[in-house]
Amino acid sequence: MTPRPSLADTAGARPVVLDGGLATLLEQHGHDLSSALWSARLLADDPEAIVAAHAEFFRAGAEVATTASYQVSAEGFAAVGTSAAEVEQLLRRSVALAARARDEVAPQGWVAASVGPYGAMLADGSEYRGDYDVDVAALRRFHRPRLDVLGGCVGEGADLLAVETVPCLAEVEAVLAELDGTGVPAWLSLSAAPGGRTRRGEPLTEAVAMAADVAEIVAVGVNCTPPEDVAAALAAVGTGPAVVYPNGGQTWDAVARAWEGESAFTAEAVDGWIAQGARRVGGCCRVGPAEVTALAAQVRRGSGA
């Protein structure tokens, strides 16, 4: 079998198709994700469901599985009596499950180890606002254990880190400080507001400038952002290589823990993303296998494959 190329080195190649919303698919399969732990709960309670979801996205045309570690943190799981050692096991398990699905369904595919924002642990919607009442030092302390564990999985199941849904420059600074000098490749993906700004209202260009000084960052982009805000965000990011995986365009109600509104996600939009420099493209919340299949077909048409 031909060895997989590095996902960190595909900047000049054809666009790579990411998966969609893992939690969305798990909910469609009947799993209750209404707790503060969201899909991370299934790492302990039903790991086979996660393998099946990853496999379904691969069969749909995804080339990258994003692990179910987004919501996993010592602080979040402490509320349900899970020790720090057990949390480390869950982080490693998230990579092993995604790698297993990859190896069984799409051996030439990749695994991106998800590192969610501080706001995901709070489970109050603040990853879409960035209004954290903590400083950069506290954010570094929060991220360090997960980055250490998941970073150790790169080359051992995972291909890189997906630092995602980051809503503010303070968290960008914290994560970059922890990654700098580690040699662990990662993409940095922000949840963007209209007009090429972070959810906190800061210029995305500042995040891009900060990331440019960290060799470990192989791509900057946006995720869990409404499709209509992607073009402005990519204009701020620059010519790429960028990563783009918007949500379906609905609004998240953190109190009801539900998405509201109609989907605005269309596969045809990927042509514009690619023209603006995106080289890793997919979907986030409310984007399922059917949308990924359409997206993959659109990418193939655009690349002449």
Image (tube, helix red, strand yellow):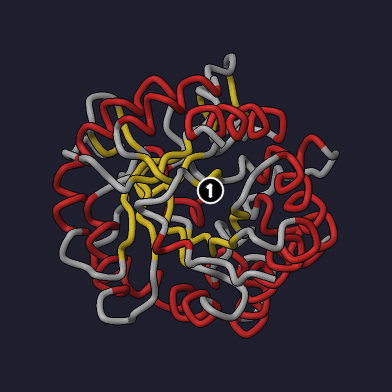
Q: Residue at x 39, y 63 (%)?
A: 9
Q: Residue at x 73, y 52 (%)?
A: 54
Query: Does residue 133 sit above or below 142 in this rendering?
Result: above
Q: Residue at x 14, y 47 (%)?
A: 206
- Quadrant hosting residue 80: bottom right
- Work out whether residue 203 or residue 153 is closer to the camera in this orientation and state it: 153
Q: Residue at x 55, y 78 (%)?
A: 153
Q: Amino acid at mark 1?
A: Ala
Q: Position of residue 260 (x, y in %)?
A: 58, 20
Image quarter where the C terminus lies is: top right
- Quadrant hosting residue 3: bottom right
Q: Position of residue 300 (x, y in %)?
A: 56, 34
Query: Does residue 95 sit above or below 271 in this rendering?
Result: below
Image quarter where the N terminus lies is: bottom right
- Work out whether residue 265 or residue 75 is closer to the camera in this orientation and state it: 265
Q: Which residue is mark 1?
A: 123
- Describe the element under mark 1 as helix, strand or loop: loop
Q: Residue furthest top?
A: 262
